[in-house]
């Protein structure tokens, strides 16, 4: 696989905070492309314009007049020329983001080194994996930002201290271990060709296989596993059913591990899961309830969401189609069917013109969207750029939906008293008012990355600097409200900028 797509996957899948820093770029032209770029996409404009027009601060959510789209041969990169038009400002901002990463890393190192996460207010740590999650989550960001000293500290800890099969006394989430630990190792191997990361990836990959039933009739992994003893459990609160997003968030990592290790067994487990999911028949084609029977013979309940419990299933379908160069039709078929049904049944535009994705239960819309679902703006835009539908009219609709969802997610930041977005919000279908602190919503902010991810993707795909400006507004709010002398905090309530929580989430640095 071309190193550039590894970097692309690293950012889009594993590295979210770097979305802001990549928007402002450290080296001018971004080194991110599609997987093994087809010839027709290789002629990317590299024209440098030193006019340094730094007066394009578009902070108005309703101002859509700025459109510096640059036509290039590569549908995943429209920013080269527009980057140079604002080069001085971009370099200045990227250094500020780099400084934020250094601050988060240094305080983690000072108060929580080797532990999962930093608690900045109490100068202590939070442990729920026993695998040094902050270090593992940060490696690709440190590498991309050229923070060489900090990267070496993290790399040396992984090489010399990390014991993935040690008995921590804790059961770990299979899902979280795949996306954080295995995802980090395969990404870092792709970025560095360092054999240590491949060895670690194979080790954790083999341990994760114990999460799968020995009976191949049951294709899905368990929810939790004890890495030292190989004991596995399924969630009791779901009635023993598995969770859609958890069992499907392995396609990229397992396929890539088979590719780089030369061992097909990981891909075989992944294929077993996608084959089982492809045979399920939901009531609405393409919209899967979030709970699935362990034996893959149907669903448990009717709750459907593109947010938590459902999100990664849809995301990984698209990214696997891109990863396989469009050669695996099953991912295209499932994604297009799902995306079309999402637009038809879950996507709504309020009377005030805000596009959003509602959850659905018992065929009724909740009109509530989670921040977690804000990734879908980038997903639809990426699907349009990749032309997964093979239909120009439908691709244009996907792009429109992606832009609208992202705009609404940004609006929840820019209209909150703290400048930070709530965990979920409700759109009144009659008035169009967006609110949180109401029944069914949650007003906390835990440094989530999904909106920034979508802004990063849309900026790269369109070259429109309004996505940079919105990203910068979010970064400024994080610096103003969440930066603490001992790290970064979330908020318990976005309406109260003083309601600091006590966790620097590891994914904030990933």
Image (cartoon, rainbow, N blue to C red):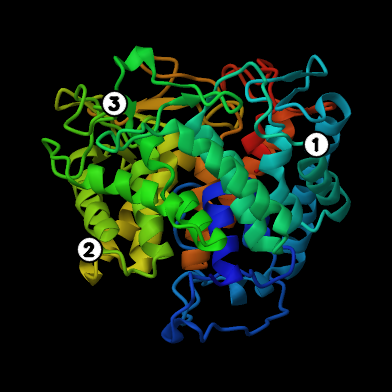
SS state under label 2: helix
Q: Position of residue 280 (x, y in %)?
A: 17, 40
Q: Are marks 1 and 3 in contact (CB under 8 Å)?
A: no
In this rendering, which labeled residue sits more in front, label 3 or label 2? 2
In-front residue for pair 9/424: 9
The label on residue 141 is none
In this rendering, which labeled residue sits more in front, label 1 or label 3? 1
Instruction: Tell me if residue 489 comes above or below residue 75 in the rendering.
Output: above
Residue visible at 74% across and 49% down in the picture: 97
Q: Is residue 387 left or right of residue 473?
A: left
Quadrant hosting residue 193 = bottom right
Q: Position of residue 402 (x, y in %)?
A: 37, 52
Q: CA distance from mark 3 to mark 2?
A: 28 Å
Instruction: Tell me if residue 492 comes above or below residue 325 in the rendering.
Output: above
Badge 1 is on which residue? Answer: 161
Badge 3 is on which residue? Answer: 428
Q: CA distance from mark 1 to mark 3?
A: 52 Å
Instruction: Tell me if residue 417 comes above or below residue 314 in the rendering.
Output: above
SS state under label 3: loop
Q: Position of residue 336 (x, y in %)?
A: 23, 56
In-front residue for pair 25/180: 180
Q: Position of residue 453 (x, y in %)?
A: 53, 49
In this rendering, which labeled residue sits more in front, label 1 or label 2? 1
Quadrant hosting residue 309 = top left
Q: Is residue 283 left or right of residue 141?
A: left
The label on residue 394 is 2
């Amino acid at each position: 696989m071309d190193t550039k797509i590894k970097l692309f996957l690293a950012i889009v899948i594993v590295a979210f905070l770097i979305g802001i820093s990549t928007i402002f770029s450290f080296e001018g032209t971004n080194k991110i492309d599609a997987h093994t770029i087809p010839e027709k996409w290789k002629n990317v404009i590299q024209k440098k314009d030193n006019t340094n027009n730094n007066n394009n601060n578009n902070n108005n959510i309703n101002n859509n007049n700025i459109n510096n789209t640059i036509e290039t041969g590569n549908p995943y990169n429209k920013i080269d020329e527009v980057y140079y038009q604002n080069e001085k400002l971009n370099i200045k901002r990227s250094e500020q983001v780099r400084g934020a990463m250094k601050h988060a890393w240094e305080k983690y190192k000072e108060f929580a080194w080797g532990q999962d996460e930093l608690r900045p207010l109490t100068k202590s740590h939070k442990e729920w994996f026993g695998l040094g999650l902050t270090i593992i989550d940060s490696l690709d960001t440190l590498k991309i930002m050229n923070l060489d000293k900090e990267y070496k500290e993290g790399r040396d800890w992984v090489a010399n201290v990390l014991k993935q099969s040690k008995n921590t006394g804790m059961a770990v989430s299979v899902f979280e271990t795949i996306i954080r630990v295995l995802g980090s190792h395969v990404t870092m191997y792709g970025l560095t060709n360092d054999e240590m990361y491949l060895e670690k990836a194979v080790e954790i990959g083999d341990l994760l296989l114990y999460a799968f039933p020995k009976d191949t009739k049951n294709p899905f992994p368990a929810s939790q596993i004890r890495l030292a003893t190989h004991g596995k459990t399924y969630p009791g609160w779901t009635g023993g059913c598995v969770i859609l997003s958890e069992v499907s968030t392995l396609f990229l990592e397992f396929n890539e591990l088979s590719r780089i290790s030369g061992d097909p067994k990981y891909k075989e487990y992944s294929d077993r899961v996608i084959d089982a999911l492809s045979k399920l028949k939901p009531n609405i084609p393409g919209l899967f309830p979030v709970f699935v029977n362990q034996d893959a013979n149907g669903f448990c309940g009717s709750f459907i969401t593109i947010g938590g419990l459902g999100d990664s299933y849809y995301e990984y379908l698209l990214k696997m189609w891109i990863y396989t160069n469009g050669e695996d039709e099953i991912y295209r078929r499932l994604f297009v069917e799902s995306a079309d049904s999402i637009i038809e049944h879950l996507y709504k535009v309020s009377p005030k013109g805000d596009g959003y994705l509602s959850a659905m239960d018992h065929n009724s819309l909740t009109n509530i969207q989670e921040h977690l679902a804000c990734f879908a703006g980038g997903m639809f835009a990426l699907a349009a750029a990749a032309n997964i539908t093979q239909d120009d009219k439908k691709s244009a609709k996907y792009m429109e939906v992606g832009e609208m969802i992202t705009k609404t997610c940004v609006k929840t930041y820019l209209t909150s008293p703290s400048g930070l977005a709530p965990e979920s919000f409700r759109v009144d279908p009659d008035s169009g008012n967006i609110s949180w602190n109401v029944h069914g919503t949650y007003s906390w902010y835990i440094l989530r990355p999904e909106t920034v991810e979508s802004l990063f993707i849309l900026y790269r795909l369109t070259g429109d600097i309004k996505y940079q400006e919105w990203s910068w507004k979010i970064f400024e709010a994080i610096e103003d409200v969440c930066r603490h002398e001992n790290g970064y905090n979330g908020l318990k309530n976005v309406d109260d900028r003083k309601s600091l929580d006590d966790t620097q989430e590891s994914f904030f640095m990933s």
